[in-house]
Amino acid sequence: MRDRVKGRRLFFISILFLVLLSFPVLSIFNQGGTVAGVPVLYLYLMVMWLLCIVAIGLFVERKRIRKPKQKA
């Protein structure tokens, strides 16, 4: 059961980043401006790519915190 929930969440994260890296969203950042000398589109792509890796990595490596059992 746990693997099924984890799989659904990873699928949701993947779809979210697929949408964030699709053409309509990318066209918003293709304006020709720069931030610290880096084109905005390139900066957006690199930040989203890094966030995708971090989000999936944190989710996969997250350990379940177990509550201590209470004695009756």
Image (cartoon, rainbow, N blue to C red):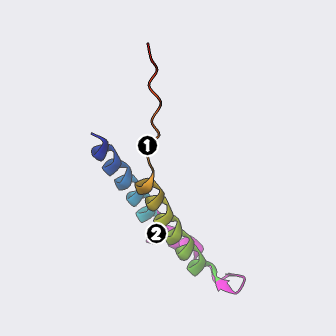
User: Would you say residue 37 sits in the magenta stretch?
Assistant: yes
Residue labelled with disc 1: 64
Three-letter amino acid code at disc 1? Arg
Graded by Cα atoms within 10 Å as few (under 14), some (14 to 19) or many (20 or more), the crowding at tag 1 reads few
Report the number of numbered marks.
2
- For the record, the magenta segment spans 20-38
Which residue is found at the position 57% from the left and 78% from the top?
41
- How far across and how far down the image is residue 14, in percent? 39, 60
Identify the mark at residue 42; answer none if there is no mark. none
Task: Give me the residue at 43% from left, 43% from top.
Answer: 64
Q: Mark 2 falls on what kind of element? A: loop
Q: Would residue 4 appear left or right of 58 to someone viewing this image?
A: left
Residue situated in front as seen by the camera: 68 or 8: 68
Does residue 30 appear anywhere in the picture?
no
Q: Is residue 21 above or below residue 7?
A: below
To which residue does mark 2 refer?
21
Label whose residue precedes the other's in the sequence (2 or 1): 2
Q: Is residue 46 left or right of residue 36?
A: left
- Indicate the quadrant where residue 11 lies: bottom left
Of helix, strand and loop, which one carries label 1? Answer: loop
Pick the residue in front: 71 or 20: 71
Q: Is residue 64 above or below residue 31?
A: above
Please provide percent x and percent y for residue 56: 43, 60
